[in-house]
Amino acid sequence: MSTFKAPKGTYDLLPPDSATYLAVREAIAAPLRGSGYGYIETPGFESVELFARGVGESTDIVTKEMYAFETKGGDRLALRPEGTASVLRAALEANLHKAGNLPVKLWYSGSYYRYERPQKGRYRHFSQVGAEAIGAEDPALDAELIILADQAYRSLGLRNFRILLNSLGDKECRPVYREALQTFLRGLDLDEDTLRRAEINPLRVLDDKRESVQKQLGDAPLLRDYLCDACKAYHEEVRELVTAAGVVFEDDPKLVRGLDYYTRTTFEFVHDGLGSQSAVGGGGRYDGLSEMIGGPALPSVGWALGVDRTVLALEAEGVELELPATTSVFAVPLGDEARRVLFAKVTEMRKNGVAADFAYGGKGLKAAMKAANRSGARYALILGGRDIEQGVVQLKDLESGEQTAVGMNEIVAELESRLG
């Protein structure tokens, strides 16, 4: 046993399960790559102030969950708790918005960190794939991202997820709602911290998961009743475009995402088979975030989908992904000369796109064939001294047990033909 273990609330991705995570990431990214989104990668840590300004100083993420530290040089940094602020910072720093082609469409994949109470589906280290469309205010962009996420989930075989949709208004209509909500919240039996949060950002109280708070919010004013005409029209167009694409959603007037930067369109993807941690992803429009972090006005929209929770959703539905075999051919040499000859042949097979492995460590025939079966390979290549004299190699089908001799110079073509 090792002296060390993974930190509390984290996990290691190990074969064969790691192949499922890779497949999920690829499935989520595929529709984005086909829709004009380019890949971006940002550092795992940023200035604390970036998240304090962008995510919101009153959010649980900033006040309770962020891993913040001070460097030897005195810089205040934080492990990134989410992706949007980092991606927007990078786009601004590189002046991507000045290249003359807006929106700037970016996708990313990476690890994020929040100090939370660990439970199934909620970890202190987690993986997301995200997408951001920066620099355009267009309902079609909001609809596009919702549709692409739906496409990604369905390509994986998921069916029992729901899309929740709402509008949070803008700087014109939200202040009126904010005042009405604050007046309502002041009349409730809430603890001091929650009342203080209500004064800073009352919408955050609507997102409070505690039952003692939620049961008092039944008669809370709804933002949809306070939307200005422009926000109503914008939201209706998003709804119409998503509906026309055949994507089913539910209007949820109480939906509030957990980050302060959202405006207008907000949405969440939930899976009822995951218990309390039912959200598998979400996002929305964040038209004012660029100004919050020192940039120009750049209306934008994006989402992030949780890889960990998507895997759990697949398990909940009993969906098994068809994963490519890590090894198609396993080579078994018998003797030193066979080892040199067969290793060269394995290298040739790999160059021709055949997934091949080798019996390392000088195993005997029995041990090597056990390793071949454990590898998941369809075929074994067995080479002994007599085979070398005859210029052949033994090709064994590990499913049927059938074994045939194939010419040494013909084996690569034979395997390519059999494996398709």
Image (cartoon, rainbow, N blue to C red):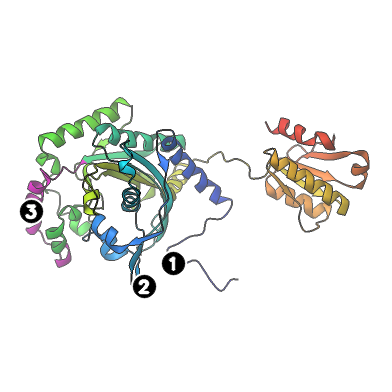
Percent of width and height locating residue 399: 73, 39
Query: Disc number at residue 73?
Result: 2
CA gap, disc 1 and disc 2: 29 Å
Question: Pointer 2: residues within 10 angstroms few (<14), some, or many (20+)?
Answer: few
* Label 1 packing within 10 angstroms: few (<14), some (14-19), many (20+): few
* Image spot of residue 160 (x, y percent): 38, 38
For residue 138, what is the image quadrant?
Answer: top left
Read off the residue under disc 1: 8
Is residue 99 something that shows in the picture? yes
Task: Tell whether position 181 is magenta.
Answer: yes
Q: CA distance from mark 1 to mark 3?
A: 40 Å
Left or right: where 9 falls relative to 292: right
Image quadrant in which the C terminus is located: top right
The residue sitting at the top extreme is: 244
- Mark number, residue 184: 3
Q: Which residues are magenta?
A: 167-194
199 vs 69: above or below: above
Count of picture labels: 3
Q: Is residue 295 left or right of residue 398?
A: left
Q: Is residue 318 magenta?
A: no
Q: Residue 286: which quarter of the image?
A: top left
- Local packing at callout 3 (Cα closer than 10 Å; few below 14, some 14-19, many 20+) is some
Sequence-wise, which precedes: disc 1 or disc 2?
1
Q: Which is nearer the eye, 319 or 357?
A: 357
